[in-house]
Amino acid sequence: MKITKMLKKNYEFRNVLTNGKYYAGNYIKVFIVKNNKECNFLGLAISSKLRKSIYEE
């Protein structure tokens, strides 16, 4: 199984948004781009609406 590293830089997120495939659910949107690296990369972006609802409980 590959190691997973986090996306941190703005240009990394932009690359995924412009070149990736898009999947959407009720509460999540997923963008995927294939790479030929030794590890997977994961980036999380949470909307302010969802963040507020989590902290208001």
Image: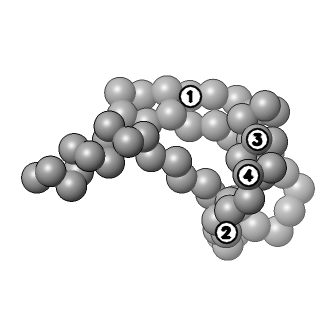
* Nearer the camera: disc 2 or disc 4: 4
Of labels 1 and 2, earlier in sequence is 2
First along the sequence among labels 1 and 4? 4
Q: CA distance from mark 1 to mark 2?
A: 21 Å
Using the image as rendered, state which of residue 55 and residue 44 is in the foreground.
Answer: 55
Q: Residue at x 61, y 54 (%)?
A: 43
Closer to the observer: label 1 or label 4? 4
Would you call the spot at circle 1 few (<14 residues within 10 Å), some (14-19), or many (20 or more)?
few
Which mark is first along the chain, 1 or 3? 3
Q: Quadrant of the N terminus?
A: bottom right
Q: Image quarter for residue 38?
A: bottom right
Mark number for residue 38? none
Asked if the residue under mark 3 is in contact with the one under mark 4, i.e. CB atoms within 8 Å, the reply is yes
Give the mark nearest the N terminus, 3 or 2. 2
Amino acid type of the residue that numbered disc 1 sits on in the rendered structure: Tyr
For mark 3, give the secondary structure: helix
Please state which amino acid type lies under the numbered disc 2: Lys
Residue 52: percent from left, percent from top: 26, 46
* Labelled pair 2, 4 in contact (Cβ < 8 Å): no
Give x and y (percent) for residue 36. Answer: 88, 56
Q: Residues within 10 Å of mark 2 (few under 14, many from 20)?
A: few
Give, as a three-letter code, the residue at label 4.
Answer: Asn
What kind of element bears circle 1? strand
- The image's mark for residue 5 is 2
Residue located beneath label 1 in the image: 23
**Cα distance, mark 4 to mark 3?**
6 Å
| Image location (x, y in percent) of residue 48 | 38, 42
Q: Is residue 5 above or below residue 23?
A: below
The amino acid type found where label 3 is placed reads Arg
Q: What is the spatial separation of the Cα atoms under label 1 and label 4, in whole angstroms?
A: 21 Å
Report which residue position mark 4 lands on.
10
Q: Label 4: state its secondary structure.
A: helix
